[in-house]
Image (spheres, grey):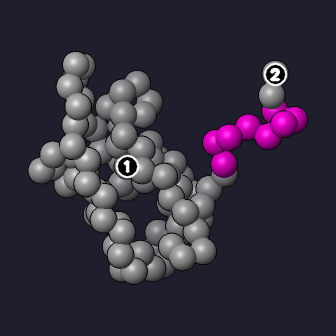
Amino acid sequence: MKESFLTLVLGGWGGSLCGLSCIDGYDAANNFTSKIFYFGTGAWWPVRLRVTDEKIEAWIEEDKIVDFTIGNPDYPCDGGESSVPSESQHI
């Protein structure tokens, strides 16, 4: 992770998708960290994120939604593509 980055997705793709983007080139909707969490409306949700040299873990309230081991050769972190459009992509 020291030379890469990931995004913790909370409530993506219609409001209930959670997970990490990008693992092995796949966004949170299409990798093994994908979880469904129904947030509802009108409430704040406590989120906890822990990043160490070995793991990335995330919780919503007491529910662990992410448990990713860094350095697993089966699931490399690639940093993915930036979701911020470049100047040439602006309409």
Q: Mark 2 points at which residue?
A: 91
Q: Position of residue 67 (x, y in %)?
A: 28, 63
**SS at circle 2:** loop
Q: What residue type is labelled 1?
A: Gly
| Relative to 15, 27 lies left or right | right
85 part of magenta stretch: yes
Q: In this view, does 89 lie above or below 70?
A: above
Indicate which disc residue 63 carries.
none
Q: Specify few, some or many for label 1: CA neighbours under 10 Å numbering under 14, 14-19, or 20 or more.
A: many
The answer to whether residue 24 is seen in the rendering is no
Q: Where is residue 31 in the image (x, y as percent from the top left)?
A: 43, 53
Q: Residue extending furthest left?
A: 62
Q: Is there a contact, CB below 8 Å, between mark 1 and mark 2?
A: no
Magenta highlight range = 82-89
Q: Residue at x 50, y 58 (%)?
A: 6
| Foreground residue among 59 and 75 | 59
- The dominant secondary structure in magenta is loop
What's the CA distance linking mark 1 and mark 2? 29 Å
Is label 1 or label 2 in front? 2
**Mark 2 is on which residue type?**
Ile
The residue beneath circle 1 is 19
Q: Is residue 2 above or below residue 19?
A: below
Q: Image quarter for residue 25?
A: bottom right
Q: Identify the residue at image location x=21%, y=43%.
A: 46
- In the rendered image, residue 60, in percent from the top left (x then y), is placed at 21, 46
Give yes or no for residue 68 being in the magenta stretch. no
Relative horizontal placement of residue 4, taking residue 51 as reference (left or right): right
**Residue 8 seen in the current view:** yes
What residue is rendered at 81% in x and 21% in y?
Answer: 91
